[in-house]
Amino acid sequence: MFKQIKQLFSTFNDQPAQIQEHDLKTAVAALLIEVMRADSEQQDDELQTLSATLKRYFNLNDAEVSELMQSAGKSLDEAIDYFQFSKQINSQCSAGQRIDIIELLWRLAYADGQLDPQEEYVIRRVANLLYVNHTDFIAAKLAATKQ
């Protein structure tokens, strides 16, 4: 599964338009940050999982991850909803790739060892915006809990 997710993000590294790549990274990072913030308790486990996820799937170094997290956090703070992020993902990702993103959100939600209802609520809203059906939503959740 990780290999497929990594392939998803490596395909965007081959795109000639750098702005689209950055926008996709920012959109995914912003949604991950929103899940991390959902329970109002920022855990070190969640922060480490977020950083590792961004490093692994976007092939970034520590400085790039820090910059992306700062940029995505700022975009999230200025956003009134998740539409701007979901629109970017929907325009650049296949249905399977969007399901993989939902699984990443689940993995982050479970990083601290417990699922807060607010985290689940955010992931459910994002899944709806990404047109991920309920069956795939649950399958992504189960896949995330097996790790």
Image (cartoon, rainbow, N blue to C red):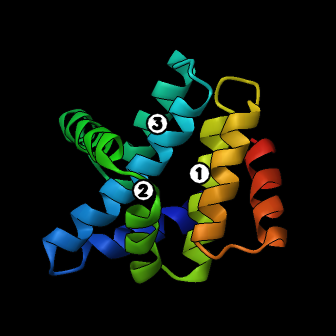
Whether 101 is drawn above or below 42: the answer is: below
| Neighbour tally class for label 1: few under 14, some 14-19, many 20 plus, Cα within 10 Å | many
Give, as a three-letter code, the residue at label 3. Answer: Leu
Residue 89 percent coordinates (x, y): 43, 71
Disc 3 on helix, strand or loop? helix
Q: Amino acid at mark 1?
A: Leu
Q: Earlier in the sequence, mark 3 or mark 1?
A: 3
In the rendered image, the residue lying farthest to the front is 80
Q: Earlier in the sequence, mark 2 or mark 1?
A: 2
Please name the residue shown 62% across and 26% down the image: 39
**Cβ atoms under marks 2 and 1 closer than 8 Å:** yes
Crowd tier of the residue under label 3, counting other residues whose Cα lies within 10 Å: few below 14, some 14–19, many 20 or above: many
**Label 2: which residue?**
28
Q: Position of residue 117 (x, y in %)?
A: 76, 35
Image disc number at residue 50: 3
- Identify which residue, 34 or 6, lies in the foreground: 34
Residue 76 at x, y percent in the picture: 35, 45
Left or right of 125, for residue 3:
left
Q: Name the residue type under label 2.
A: Val
Q: In the image, is residue 133 above or below residue 58?
A: below
- Name the element at disc 2: helix
Q: Tell me the distance, in whole angstroms, between the alpha carbons under discs 2 and 1.
A: 9 Å
Instruction: Indicate left or right for 22 with 48 as reference.
Output: left
Which residue is at 74% across, 30% downward?
Answer: 116
Query: Number of numbered discs present?
Result: 3
In this rendering, the label closer to the viewer, 2 or 1: 2
Which one is nearer the viewer's eye here, 7 or 100? 100
Q: Identify the disc placed on residue 104.
A: 1
Q: Are marks 2 and 3 in contact (CB under 8 Å)?
A: no
Residue 83 in view, yes or no? yes
- Residue at image location 49% in from the left, 41% down from the top: 34
